[in-house]
Amino acid sequence: MSKRPAFLPMGSVTGIGSLPHTDVEAAIQLVAQACPAVPFWPQLPRLSICDYMIEQALGPRNTFLMPRKVGYGYHVKPGFLKVFLHELREGVAALDEDMATGFFAFERAIQAGVFNRAQALKGQLVGPITLACMLFSEEHVFVLDQECLSAVTSFIARLAVWQVQRLQQWSLPVICFLDEPCLALLTHDPFKQIAAQALEALHEVVMTLQATGTLVGIHCCAGQTSFRAVCQVAPDIISFDAYQDVEAFCTDPHARTFFNEGGLVAFGLVPTSSDLSLLDPTTVFARWLLACQDLGDVSQCASHTLITATCGLGLLSLMQAEATFRSAQHIADLVRKAVIMT
């Protein structure tokens, strides 16, 4: 992690990734309105199952897989493990236009000047730990096998680099979040035994992206986030469910060191909920402000802060997604005032 970020977000609003739209142009317009400083490309799971993060990342390689009959994830079809691993290690890594319509629409919108107020551009991708937790052979889950985990890591690193290099053509700082909900599993059996190898795999992807000049974020909102584990892989940005855990983050010694070394934080202060009628943005801001005093200088904390929902919004209604961004913008306005006033 660089001690001097390529840009300071100053309380800007951005999104985690998914939106509930089935019209990609409408999704782009919402991003432009709600996230003018740090727009992101929208993933649209209601448009197609291909826009789910696992399926979207794997693209044509999905032909080697079949859904598990029990539980989550995918089995590699019998007899195809060797070719599937070869495709992960050596095949072309790129998003498919038919499976990532939001990414290519985002590129067209940037070119057309839709995001002319952007200070940075954000992309996102499933992380190697989570992808490896979702893939199974006849014998084991990929994350528990070093050869399989290595193949997944190589693929995600190449796919992430492809994505950020496409976005870098507009000469703005580029952010890439690696979505890692399965980080929370590393404190439980049987995953504890491979935690070190899994974190090293994630660290490898982080370093590969940082070498391109990208600001790398780790997003984990599942269960109680291990800030020690997240800090261990040395991202530039930590993204988490701050509605639940803002106090825990600001008092965590590893998180405090991360912040003091110049790290940026995407505070997920707006719950991904179908009903925000009882949410008071001023009260949420007050919690954030009080918690950030444990990090030290509040003005510095505010300048290093992004405001997000706790997670993606793909399962909400359009009206609920819009309400989420309105709440985020209200909180962000208060955070920006904290930069000026302190």
Image (tube, grey):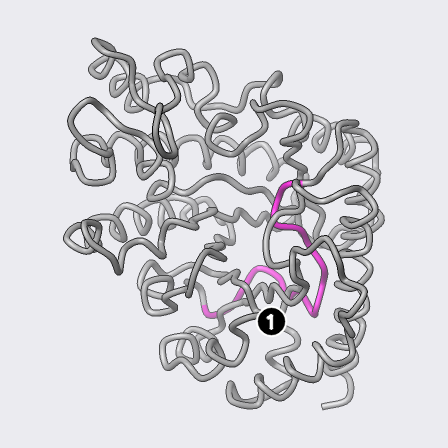
Labels in figure, total = 1
Answer with left or right where residue 155 lies relative to residue 305.
left
- Is residue 265 depicted above or below 221 in this figure? below
Q: Which residues are magenta?
A: 3-18
For the point 40% across and 80% down, the residue is 252
Sort mark 1 into few (<14), some (14-19) or many (20+) by Cα contacts within 10 Å: many
Residue 322 falls inside the magenta stretch = no
Callout 1, which amino acid?
His
- Is residue 7 depicted above or below 158 in this figure? below
The quarter of the picture where residue 231 lies is: bottom left
For the point 66% across and 40% down, the residue is 314
The quarter of the picture where residue 227 lies is: bottom left
Our reading of the magenta stretch's main secondary structure is loop
- Is residue 264 depicted above or below 171 in this figure? below
For the point 79% across and 27% down, the residue is 23
Who is closer to the viewer here, 207 or 221? 221
Q: Secondary structure at mark 1?
A: loop
For the point 55% across and 70% down, the residue is 244
Question: Which quadrant would the C terminus be assigned to in this image?
Answer: bottom right
Residue 114: where, in percent of width, then height?
84, 39
Who is closer to the viewer here, 1 or 91? 91
Question: Which quadrant would the N terminus be assigned to in this image?
Answer: bottom left
The quarter of the picture where residue 42 lies is: top right
Answer with left or right where residue 330 lies relative to residue 154.
right
Residue that sits furthest to the front in the current view: 70
Who is closer to the viewer here, 328 or 40? 328
Residue 230: where, in percent of width, then height?
37, 62
Residue 162: where, in percent of width, then height?
49, 30
- Is residue 279 depicted above or below 102 in this figure? below
- Residue on which disc 1 sits: 304
Residue 7 falls inside the magenta stretch = yes
Residue 228: where, in percent of width, then height?
33, 69
